[in-house]
Image: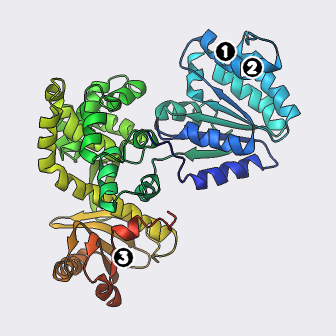
Amino acid sequence: MIVRFINRQIELNYLEEIASSPRAELVVVYGRRRVGKTRLLLEFLKRRGGLYFYIPNGGKGTVLRSLSQVVEANFYSGFTFREFDEFLRYLSRWFTEHRGGVVVLDEFQNLSILKGAVSLLQKSWDEEYSRIGAKLILAGSSVGMIERVSLRGDAPLYGRKTGVVELEPLHPAYLAQWFPRLEHAKLVELYGVFGGTPAYLELVNPSRSVEDNVKRLILDKRGPLYREPEFLLMEEVRTPARYVDILGAISQGKITLSEISDYTGISRENVTTYLATLISMRLVAKESTPTKKASRYTLTDPFFEFWFRFVLPNRPLLEHDLQNQVWEKIKQEYNAYLGRVFERIASLHIASKIRKGELVIHPDYLGAWWDKDVEIDIVALSTREGKAVLFEAKWSTLTQKEARRILESLIQKATKLPTHQNTYGLVAKDVYQKEKLLHEGFIVYTLSDIFNPNQSV
């Protein structure tokens, strides 16, 4: 297992600013489980100092014992808070004695299990902590619960937070730092299976093939990720089977509301409700273009897309330990699947270039473009400026002839866009003599650009 702490500099810098602030700060840090929240917060506290409390998913006694163990040395062996308000009073004293000190409550959504705990925390913040410059970080991994407790308009802590950090999976470019000895194409394959979730990447053995890692970690019924998506859904929703059906439908290419409803047998009205929940969990994205009213839905995480496309339909075989046979089936579609993964990577790379000002446009739309018989992989469109930057992404190494043919087709497609100034580009594994295209004003990105170890994202 490779344990890494990579990137997260933006988040660390933000938390450092919060800790240095002269005012009281109540910050919510959240994201899907295993995305690295605890690692980030412990790294921050290692640099800054402070108290870290973990809130277990248990009853009153379990929670109070967990909180007490952190401060036991300040009292006596076996010390235990008898009530939650005793713990809150302890924090008040600690904040007073440690001006500017930071306290982290991890998995704080579990406090909702204790009757009145969240309201007591709210009261303590209003009446005490906010008046003594406290720095309180509330972190959690149940996205829906976090929103209900702290982010929605009717949430108990709504209006009190001074900052929100939603921690996302790692950008694919950072896999080059995680696995510095692997070829760039292998990094795409790993990202296509495990995504950017640190806890999944830590399980990967880079000295073994992608195939071996997939079989060992995902296809083997004893593997740690064999049932991972099911466990996540069971933690988040009441009827996980319905969500499994919908995610499975999307992974099989059913991407419109009607297609998902027909495939699953769930009414359109109910599908809409389930999709809204999946979107709030950051597992599904709703896409539409400025000229196309109809929306389509995609899975946001490569690991979940891989699992629902290749693992779920083959569970009967995998339960009989037929991993090798299932992998042979996967191989028939794997390259086409990686093509779509590469489009995602290309889109993220282009967004990074725009964000850093290396690609100059102020887009109000960035994503795939489709309208009638026209589909373009990536379009960054500025309707105000009447300009666009258009890309096709190809999971292959292109000759000059192939690259020019793709660009000519892209220029023709662009006539359907409401723009008068366009720039055209390619994203591919590699392009022979790409300098010629660059000299002519085209933009060309290859794997060496995407996984450049010296670039920031």
Callout 3: 10 Å neighbours few (<14), some, many (20+)? many
x and y percentages locating residue 394 in the rendered image = 23, 67
Q: Is residue 349 visible?
A: yes
| Disc 1/disc 3 C-alpha distance (Å) | 57 Å
Is 378 placed left or right of 407 in the picture? right
Instruction: Specify which label sits upstream in the sequence, 1 or 2.
Output: 1
- Which label sits on residue 450? none
- Horizontal side of residue 60 vs 130, given as left or right: left
The residue positioned 62% from the left and 36% from the top of the image is 158
Q: Provide residue 30's location: percent of width, then percent of height.
A: 54, 39
Nearer the camera: disc 3 or disc 2: 2
- Quick one: SS at disc 3? strand
Query: Dot 1 surroundings within 10 Å: few (below 14), some, or many (20 or more)?
Result: many
Dots 1, 2 in contact, CB < 8 A: yes
Give the residue at the far right of this rendering: 97
Q: Residue drawn 43% across and 79% down?
A: 385
Residue 43 position in % (x across, y down): 63, 43
Label 3, label 2: how many angstroms apart (C-alpha)?
56 Å
Q: Write down the residue under mark 3.
A: 388
Question: Which quadrant would residue 270 be assigned to in this image?
Answer: top left
Residue marked by disc 2: 87
Could you tell me the amino acid type at mark 2? Phe
The numbered mark, 1 or 3, whose residue comes first in the sequence reads 1
